[in-house]
Image: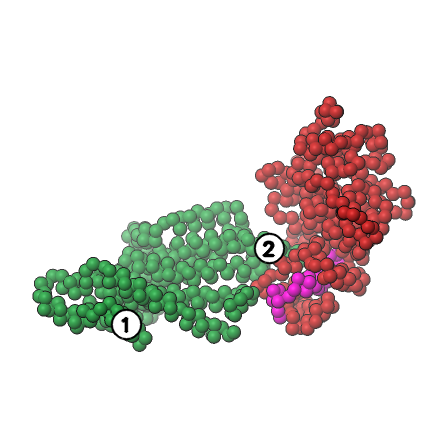
Chain colours: A red, B green
Amino acid sequence: MSSNPLLSVEGLTVQFFTDRGTVTAVNEISFEIQEEEIVGLVGESGAGKSVASMSLLRLINGPGRIVEGEIRYKDRTLFALEEGPDGEPRKREDMLSDEEMRTEIRGNEIAVIFQDPMESLNPVYTVGNQLQEFIKLNRDISKKEARSEAIRMLREVGISDAAERYEKYPHEFSGGMRQRVLIAMALACKPNLIIADEPTTALDVTIEGQILDLVQDLQEKYGTSFLWVTHDMGVVADICEQVNVMYLGNIVEQAPVDDIFYNTKHLYTDALLDSMPRPDRTVERLKAIKGVMPSAIDPPEGCPFHTRCPDARQVCEQTHPDLRDVSDDANIIHRSACLKHDIFNVNYEGSLPMTDETKRQANTSAGTTSVNETGADR
Amino acid sequence: MSILRYAIDRILQTIPVLIGVSLITFLFINALPGDVISALYADQALGEESIRALEERHGLNESFFERYLSFMAGILQGDLGYSIHYETSVTSLVLTRAGPTLMLTLSAFAFAIVTAIPLGAIAASRRNQSPDHLSRIVALFGVSTPSFWVGIMLIVIFAVTLGWLPSGGLVYPWRAPGHYGFDSQLELYVQTVQSLLLPMIALGTMQMAMLMRIERSEMVETLQRDYIQLARAYGVSERTILRKHAFREAQLPIITIVGLNISTALGGSVVIEQVFDINGIGKLLLSAIELRDFQVVTGITLVLAAIFVIGVVITDIAYAYIDPRITLDGGE
């Protein structure tokens, strides 16, 4: 990775303070996005992908709050804390104010595309009205210029009769067309980074293919970076250059796309790949990942994946692995948070495998089971 | 389909409703004990002969259907019947009394809307903070207090104790200032507003409370939509989000409630007109019932029903105007 990333996230932690307890939705994640790069953020529902991506804009609602970490964009600090004189964390001086985030970052530097194009446009205003408003706001141009820019972008994303469609309401567009409108909206604001939060999940497969092609073309043309949030490894393979795999709020594997697919270093990524239909493999049945992701309100101790991991050993229950470079190639950084790798040096090989029985116990009393108890059971 | 065509269609559809209302009213009035002649001449001992003569003169000896049909025939010519007690046509009675009632009802709604919408929106944007709690208390008070009690309390406080405002009677802005002994047109208007203030608040409080709660919950729901989050992600200010992006969709249920509540408010004005001694349709209706002047009762009921039905039609049209997803062709 180059020394000057467009965006860098360091130790980002987001917690939700609910009545039932504190939920750590994002747990000390770090990643970078380079200029003109498409970076994938992959994981199952509830892994914390959307929360992580929205925290880049500091748009976390309700009881949620970024509690730790540093987010830098170009030479600006989107989020950073320091220890105040009273020992409590406080905002660091160089961190942008809410007003600066709103006027200088959101939209014009970092734009977003949401999952559901049906819900992302205001039903009571015309598509043009909304495009024009956002473009005018973020590019500081007149209404007239914003209008012609909007129409030009609509044409660019493949909407015919753009000038006419500009006057139409969202319900007069199909899902795929609406997502094109939202892509036009994002690009027209001329951001350097677009957060695409599962933008093709709500679309059917043929439309998804078209949208992915469109995004790739436009990305090359405009040189925009993307953070592509998805649960679909197929989409990742299609467009991403760098991939972050998330599980239960943690990034568990981080590598260039080819290494993720052909040199997988985390068993969760493995399981994700196995659960995906692939044209290069013939299988009787797709392998689903066993069990469900544990609740983030009461996450398992040790490795978060050990309750579902086929190769979990007792050491996995005791040690929470951080993300370490496990690459055997000096030119490639391939990080994984799996204790299997020698670099962790926790005597994985010498540890006893966890049986389904012990895993179930860990599942039901996650966080409270001590090593001795499981040992005695055996 | 044009709005005009749609409006005409909807108004034509209301005709069966109005016929039903007239028939039911006619039936119930006839079922009431007592009759207009004996109510009118209660203090005079009339002979059989003169009673029969009076009945014949007013067509009271005809059968129910004959009377109903001649009433309906009158309706088609804009004639609501003849009041035996007031000895004038019901149409002119209603017309002269409609002004105060409409003034009262419309101002009560204006008061309710103007206060409820901003308060509800503020409560929604400051959810579970003190403005929200305050609005909840006001709303609870508003919906659980009968309007006549609010009216009486307003009179006690502002008219009797403080002496700031008149305790009853309306000053009509359409009369000449000299009629009330005022010097200028301006003084007339000032007096009109002063006389209208208390009955307007008394009648509007419940509507205000209800609308405020609906506005709040609609705004809360709308503010959670994806397109609101998208607007935030594009750097739109919270103020613009509240005023432009969330506001419009949140108003749809308000329009429905206002449209449907016109009848409630007209019903409420019957009571408020008594409390504040306002000579409107409501007061006329109550005395007509006491006097068994059933032509007047039927006529007023029909007029109120027509106003209600027209309110519903206007609601539908306003809906289609605000929400582009609703077409006027009958489908979505």
Quadrant, the C terminus of chain A: top right
How packed is label 1: few (under 14 Cα within 10 Å), some, or many (20 or more)?
few
Bin the neighbour count of mark 2 within 10 Å (Cα to Cα): few under 14, some 14-19, many 20 and up: some
The subunit letter for the residue under badge 2 reads: B
The answer to if A182 sits in the magenta stretch is: yes
The residue indicated by pointer 2 is B225
In primary-sequence order, the first of circles 1 and 2 is: 1
Mark 1: secondary structure:
helix
Q: Which residues are magenta?
A: A167-194
Tell whether A150 sits left or right of B158.
Answer: right
Q: For the residues marked 1 and 2, what is the alpha-carbon distance in whole angstroms?
A: 55 Å
The answer to whether residue A248 of the structure is visible from this angle is: yes
Horizontal and vertical percent position of residue A67: 68, 42
The x and y percentages for residue B27 are: 27, 63
Of residue A46 and residue A345, the one placed in the foreground of this image is A46
**Amino acid type of the residue tagged 1 in the rendering:** Leu
Q: Give the image location of residue B32, x and y in percent.
A: 23, 59
**What is the three-letter code of the residue carrying label 2?**
Arg
Name the mark on residue B316.
Answer: none
Q: Which mark is residue B69?
A: 1
Q: Magenta stretch mostly in which secondary structure?
A: helix
The image quarter in which residue A247 lies: top right
* Residue for point 40% across, 59% down: B261
Extreme residue in the front direction: A284
Query: Do dots 1 and 2 share one subunit?
Result: yes
Q: Which residue occupies the foreground of this view, A250 or A84? A: A250
**Percent from the top left, x then y, of residue B295?**
25, 67
